[in-house]
Structures are given as C-alpha cells and as structure tokens.
Amino acid sequence: MTIIQRFVIVISLAVFFQAHTRATQFVYKGFHGGGGLKLSGSADILSSGLLQLTDFKTRVLGHAFHPYPLHFKNHTFSFSTTFVFSIDPEHPDLGGHGMAFVITPFPDLPGAFPGQFLGLLNSSTMGKAFNHLFAVEFDTVRNFQLEDIDDNHVGIDLNTLVSVASAQPEVCLKCGENIQAWIDVNDAGSNHKVDVFVAIAGSGKPSRPLLSAAIDLSAVILKGDMYVGFSAGTGLLSSKHRVMGWSFNTNGSAADLVLPPGKRGRQLVIIVPSVALAALFCGLVSVLVLRRRRLRDSEVEEWELELAPRRFTYSELEVATKGFKELLGSGGFGRVYRGVLSGGQEVAVKRVAHDSKQGLREFAAEISTIGRLRHRNLVKLHGYCRRQRKAELLLVYDYMPNGSLDRHLFFTGGGPGLSWERRLDILKGVAAALL
C-alpha cells in the first residue's frame, strides 16, 4: 500500500467518525439557513427561522430530519432530546391531524400516508418489524381504529400508530401554544425506560413525566445508522405543525433551549393583577347575559319553520352522545359523533363549526334544503339543534355503520376502496335523489 493510499484511508476514516460525532449532540436554536436538515413533503424553513412541517393544505405530510445519522452501537440506545413546537389548526378546536418525533432508518419514510398515519406509515406497513420505527406522537384527532384515548394526547409508538402507552397532557396541543417536550430514553443494562415530559414553553421541565414506560428499544432501533427528526400529516382538516428549536444528545441530558414562551406563559404575567377586577365585573353581568342567551336560543326564525324536522335541545344531544365522546369522523363543516336517542335509535350528530364569513340564516337555508329531501340514496336528517350564541348548528342524521363515503373514496379506512363502476353507481344514485 502506497503512502498516498494510506493517507486517503486516514482522511476517509476521519471524515466518517467526525460525521458520527457531530450527530451525537446538536442544538438548533431556530432553523435560519435551513441547518442542513433533510426536508421532504410540505416541510419548509420559514423566513422567521421556524421549521414548518405542514401548512393549511389538506391531506399533506412533511418530514424534517437531522442531516447526519446516529450510529447506535454496543447495544446502547440511550439519548435525551427536547424541542419546542406548536400546532395551530385552521379551524379552532378542530385538529388536523398531528405530528411526531421519530427515529427511523428511512428518512424519506417511503409509502407513508398523511392523516391519521402522521406521515409515518400506511395501512399495509402498520405493525411490521422491518419498520424499525420509534416515535412519540402529539395527536389532535381521536381515531378509534388506532385506539386513541381522545383528541388531545401524547403516545409512544413502536412500529405502529397503536401506542404502547399514551396520556392526556394538561396543555392543549391544538391551541397554537408554544409547547416544549422532553424525551429521555435510558437503556443502560437491564434498566429500560422511556420518559416523556410536556409543558408550556418557558415554564420549565416538569418534575414528573407525563408518560413513563419500561420499553426495550433494542428490538426496534437498529444497531447502526438511524435518523432522528419530525413528521406531521393533515387529513380532511389541516393544521400548521411547526418546530421552533431542537436539542439532542446521546451522552447525557440535551442542552437547554432558551426560546420565547408560549402564549399562555406571556399572558400570565399581565392577567394576575386583573383577576379580582375581572371576577367582580363578571359577577355583575352574568345574570343579564344568561337571560339574554335564553331568549336568543328560544327564538324561532323563518328558516326553522321551513326545516320541518324535530328541534332537539343541546342537553338532549349531549346526553345522547355521552358528552360527544365517540368521534366518527371529521367533515367539511365539523365533526360527527355517534349517539343513541332516548328511544334507543342510533344517530350520527354533526357539530357544525359555523364560518363567521357566512350569515347563520344563509347557511341554515342550505340545511333546510337537505331537510326536505327524502330518498333511499340520501341519509335522512332527523332534526337539528341551534345554539345562536355560539353560531353553531348540530344536525342529527341516520347512523351509518359502514362509515362515511369519503373513507371508501379516499382509502382512509384501510380497505380496498371502491371500483370506478361502484363510484359511478353512487353518482347516479345521488343524482336520482336530487332530481
């Protein structure tokens, strides 16, 4: 071997070990200049230095990974990471869909779907050992097929989106707050543990973890190169999923992030001196407000006389749906919940998130048209509930056990989907109902 050949080998080894050394500890206090991140899908670096995984487009996904892979060796998978993120939905209180911190050998996550799959997997790869995927999800939509506990939860995922452990944080994930998460993985010896902490950014790391699970990652994480980063996806509804800063360390605790606090953290500084005055004011006007609300909700407008079906009270529908707990899906105007009326009839209750750009009368006129339709090819409208003070409508339909049509049109239910012949039959049936 010549001197030149030896020199080339030495330089190559130096570059190789330098790359892996850089990957064991890093801090992004903002992402100005891109930071060399591997971006794919809708992910982008904004001019403000924020990493945006998804915007307000529906059915999109975004990925962002640290450019250098982590090299796990000696059967050790311990690491510590912290990051600040926010989830800002297009429609208030309607998440769409969620994001995750992820470790994977495949930074492009081939074949991944958006929506409930969060850009991580698809229906055919769920639960497969070859995924070698570890993720901590921040989910804002409840999916019963994935055994989600609610629409505001944090979960630990191993090769599937059915979480091995999940919990509801005290913070609202979909309220646009700057939220900080800490993930500590200890895999030393026989002690296998994953701890997840969540708090409003700037309030400090909680003393107790939100999630703590005994998990051996040796069967999941490859003993080789793995990429760390973030993934997010939107569904029928959309949200902006953003990351403000990120710190990671495979040897010890991740470095602290000094970033602006969340909205709530800033507000606490100014609202505390005003609490007494606000409480007094609220006490003086509460009686007048309650009386006015009762009068408004009892008024019957012309469009309600046209609608014809039964008018339900809000309390009736709240009892029927057990507090709107069983989410069936999200549609163009809001969310749909399963319910059982007092007579035992199963129904689907749609909570219409009213658009302030459109008058309630104009919107209700469209609903009254549906109320007059009667055909076997159209779902029957049984009644409605109007909450004028919240500019909200609740519509009561027949319960369809096979789910909504869009699940079969867009393959979101995990099945084979509908053939083109079947789709044409559906169009003909709907057209016949509207003639």
Image (tube, rainbow, N blue to C red):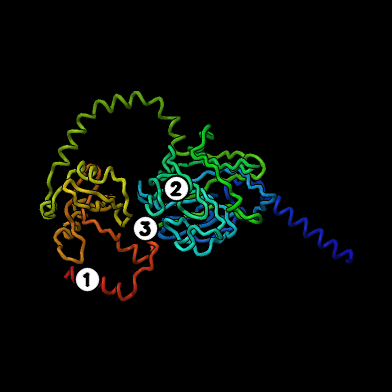
Is label 3 in a helix, a strand or a loop? loop
Sequence order check, earlier mark of 3 and 1: 3
- What is the C-alpha distance between the residues marked 1 and 2? 40 Å
Whether residue 377 sits left or right of residue 132 in the image: it is left
Q: Is residue 307 visible?
A: yes
Say what amino acid the circle numbered 3 marks: Leu
Q: Nearer the viewer, residue 424 or 53?
A: 424
**Residue 344 in the image: x percent, y percent?**
19, 49
Residue identified by numbered label 2: 87
**Residue 221 in the image: x percent, y percent?**
60, 53
Residue identified by numbered label 1: 429
Whether residue 219 sits left or right of residue 340 in the image: it is right
Label 2 Cα neighbours within 10 Å, binned few <14 / some 14-19 / many ≥20 = many
Q: Nearer the viewer, residue 325 or 88?
A: 325
Is label 2 in a helix, a strand or a loop? strand
Is label 1 in a helix, a strand or a loop? helix
Say what amino acid the circle numbered 1 marks: Gly
Above or below residue 76? Residue 114 is below
Label 3 Cα neighbours within 10 Å, binned few <14 / some 14-19 / many ≥20 = some
Residue located at (44% from left, 61% from top): 123
Residue located at (55% from left, 51% from top): 134
Above or below residue 86? Residue 272 is above
Q: Quadrant of the C terminus?
A: bottom left
Labelled disc at residue 236: 3
Residue located at (65% from left, 54% from top): 223
- What is the C-alpha distance between the residues marked 3 and 2? 16 Å
Residue found at the far front of this picture: 190
Residue found at the far bottom of this picture: 421
Say what amino acid the circle numbered 2 marks: Ile
